[in-house]
Amino acid sequence: MERIIGIDLGTTNSCVSVVEAGAPKVIPNKGGYKTTPSIVAISESGRRLVGQMAKRQAITNARHTVYAAKRLIGRKWGSPAVLHCQETCPYEIVPGPHDDVRIMLRGKEYSLPEISSIILQEMKLVAEEYLGEEPEKAVVTVPAYFNDNQRQATKDAGRIAGLDIVRIINEPTAAALAYGFGKNLDATIAVYDLGGGTFDISVLEISAGVFDVISTAGDTFLGGEDFDARIIEHLAYEFAREHRVDLRKDEMSLQRLKDAAEKAKIELSAMKETEISLPFIYTKESGEALHLQSTLTREKFEELVADLVHRSVKICQATLQEAGLDEADIDDVILVGGMTRMPKIQAAVAEYFGKEPSKAVHPDEAVAIGAAIQGMALVDSSQDVLLLDVTPHSLGLMVHGGGFERLIEANTTIPTSHSHNFTTVRDNQTSVKIVVFQGESDKAIENELLGEFVLTGLRAAPAGAVEVQVKFNISPDGIVSVAAKDLETGKEQSITVTATSGLTEDEIQDMIQENQDYLVALKEDEEIERERAKITKLIREVEKLVDAFGGRNEDDVRDACDSAQIVVHEARNALSSRDFEQVAASVSALDRAKDLLQSLA
Amino acid sequence: MLDDNLRPIPQTNVDYTSLPINPTPEEYFLLSRINGNVTVGEICQISGLSIEATHKALARLQEAGLIKIPEPEKKTAAESGMYDSVEGVDFGQEEVAAPAVEEADAASSAPSESKPAPEHRPPPKVEVMGTSMLNPAPELDVDDGLGPAFFDGWPVAFSAYSFDPEALNESVSISDELKRYILYIHAHIDKVDYYKVLNVARDAGRKEVRASYFTLSKIFHPDSFYGKETGSYSEKIDDIFQGLSKAHQVLSNKNKRSEYDATLASAESAPSAPSSPGATAPAAADVAQSGSGSSGGQAVDKKKEMAFGVLVKRGEKHEAAGEYVEAAAEYKKAFAIKHDPLVALRGANLLMRSGEEHIDDAILLAKAAAKEDPSNAKPLILIGDAYEEKGDYESARDYYERARAVEPDNKVVGRRLKYLETAAH
């Protein structure tokens, strides 16, 4: 049976899992870690760096290191989230051709799906090394509160990475799968998922292998990054008061602050206070070096983030209300996401739900495990697992006066669809424009614009005579599609999407090609790299042998040493060559020289 | 040759380990369709075998002691409650409601071991088949998903439904019996109430509703067909699943359910309601009463009038605030207390403006209004509009015709009818 891997594409960390013989397993990366930082960097030489490698060089290469790309994916240029990132991120965010967002790295613009595709590819590689074969299909998770644009962009990322994303599922739902899989549960549970960038809360009923999401809500801009930002602000403010210098204006200082903030946050989950020491954080124009030395207590940290914690609890309240449930109806609360390690959050959740949250699932791994379980459930019909998820946002149209007419309500079980009839209002009208939004506001423009669809090629007829039925579909991935048909002729009507922040098919194809080219070049580079390593080693060996002949003056020895030195000289030049043939030739020349010298010794 | 009118009876407590002859898979398949209620003639039609082969198979089943074919002179009971049943392994308990079956010992009935994986044609597992066939549990087991009781009260009996042969012959990876289920349910799911959709009693609790929804979802969720060739069935499967989740959404929500019950009750008291078998109407009325609380019930007329007024006022308040669905709910409750056609029509109008998921409710309410005041064309036009919106042009035409009968000069009706005619070519 084909294997479908599960990938948790997180804001700060990603994780991959696969089900083997009915048991889900989290696959560690080369470094032995079960999660990989969702960080992508482009090195000076144009090499892509991913994960731990990218994280390590972030301080010195801040401008070309992208972290938390998930906070930008599927967003529109000029949206509050993007403005926020522009202010706080050291990398350069530029507008794309469709009102979308691009990131400028080493003079090249990258779309967000491309950045995510690099991470997906890395996760695919992690799985490939473990499985011994290239996984082709994956279930990828997204925050439950992701809208259509964000989901679509995530799917695009999969295509660019050469990974068939067979299903997108919601992170809290995935965590619930990990929690309930293999147990014969009959329970109502809440999943509180506070990750690196997003917050989700989902309420599910689990029974007879069916995982039914009753209601879900969240905030796609509330996560660990925001907690870090509060510490950064606090430190930067203290520092500014003392030294009149805003550290956040300096890329490298900011990156160091960011690192220290994350570390302090993690430490404060276990300790009551932590030391933050950043020597030489800033050098004044006068040449005077400044150092940051500070102590942060857990109490102070909790004070800094109190409103964030409160915000999440508020959303929990709203969700339960929407589900028509009381806190007492919840049998178990599951905590997911690294941020839920924070004692204050555990306490807030316990207080709100009136019970200690369950620690039955691993906060960093549960989501990937759930994704792998869903992947298995799709292909293995002997598995008695069925996921019934919901759409997190209402889908509707802009109507006269800018109002928002809901066609599909939030928390409707997906897949679902809705048909709506449109009539022409003018004689010989040949096209109809439909503007589709997703959101909860009664004013259309306050919601997320999904796209403008133009029905074209309508029959020329008197006003009102042409009636077109438009069917809005929400797939099991939570992705919206639109189809139209002329009611009288029954003919499928063509629809053109005219306004969407998503990538065009051409762009995606280009990106796929570019990615392929990069991978081919990378493979060549790696081969050259291996040869170069051989050269370095051989040069050392040859030089040692020549040195060992130091005093000897026989002709053959002298000749051999001379020619060896010429070979070494050429090999040194070859080290900087990008021509594989030249590099390989040097390796064999060195080999021969070494053999000759050894035979004379 | 056997008489076509005979109704073979499945036998209970047969020791499957020592049958005198071993039936073939085809014969076991036939056995699964025998519930004591289908006639030999019907079995021949549905067996997929030639008449001769079917008779032979029946004879062998009798020889094996698995069925009993009664003597020819015995005349059978009413035609009602007749349904076809599909393979017992998957769905089991077809014979639950079969009057001819001996009451089985519930305690000895082991639960069916088979999983609800209807897309696979089950292997002829003797024990499983036997358990399922011969020890009918008195209640529908959740694990078995679909049973004959499922279609109790549906507009057309499963066995009487004429399946589209083209669809049945379509080469897809769906078993024959599941194809039939899909075609049958898809054709009728919009015509039966939510309780029938989920096959639960009107007084079923939230858990029962959920259990049934979950069981059916496992069969009809598109994911159950993942990676399988489903052809033209794929859209039908989507529709069925959506029908199931819509029904569940309403019946699992206290408020939505009591509203729904009220409309159901008022619609069912109207003779025009399409799927109101007399037997279920009183039950619905009871539910409606408990749903609308003490405001209705046995209260005196004055009290009723007051409650009616309060509800209408509340509705108006919602309406003014643009909360149409809430307003309609109040009007519905008001109508349940006093059958004022205007208040029902008002509610129906609002529901029509509140999106597709409310169309069915709008229809029910408008039907109630039409029943109260048959001389008014407005509710009829509204029903026509609603059916048109739903794409059920046949029903739409019916109601427009009825509206025309009431008000022959109505221009809107004339235009709609003309349009529907052209649309139908």
Image (cartoon, rainbow, N blue to C red):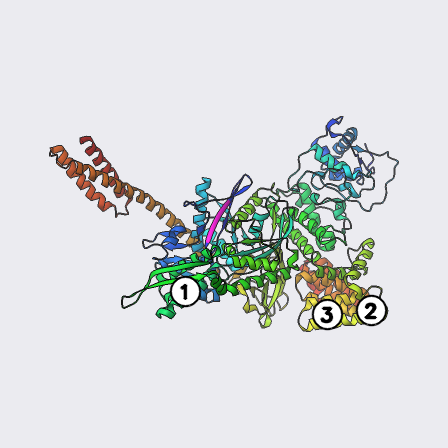
> How far apart are the two marked residues, 1 and 3, measured between alpha carbons?
75 Å
**Is A409 situated above or below A50?**
below
Residue type, numbered disc 1:
Leu
Q: Quadrant of the N terminus of chain B?
A: top right
Q: Which residue is label 3 attached to?
A: B411
Residue beneath label 2, please? B304
Chain letter of the residue carrying label 2: B
Residue B102 screen position, x and y as percent: 82, 38
Q: Which mark is residue A235?
A: 1
Residue B112 position within the rendered picture, expressed as x and y whole percent measured from the top left: 70, 38
* Amino acid at dot 3: Lys
Horizontal side of B157 relative to A517 (left or right) equals right
Would you say residue A15 sits in the magenta stretch? yes
State the image quarter where residue B165 is shown: top right
Question: Which residue is more in the foreground, A290 or B59?
Answer: A290
Q: Are marks 2 and 3 on the same chain?
A: yes
For residue A346, say whether it is visible: yes
Toward the viewer: A120 or A296? A296
Residue at horizontal 54 percent and vertical 38 percent from the top = A21
Q: Secondary structure at mark 1?
A: helix
Query: Mark 1 or mark 3: which is in front?
Result: 1
What is the spatial separation of the Cα atoms under label 2 and label 3, in whole angstroms?
Answer: 38 Å
State which region is magenta: A13-17
Which circle, 2 or 1, is nearer the viewer? 1
- In the rendered image, residue A477 lying in the magenta stretch gets the answer no
Q: Identity of the amino acid at label 2?
A: Lys
Q: Cβ–Cβ below 8 Å for labels 2 and 1?
A: no
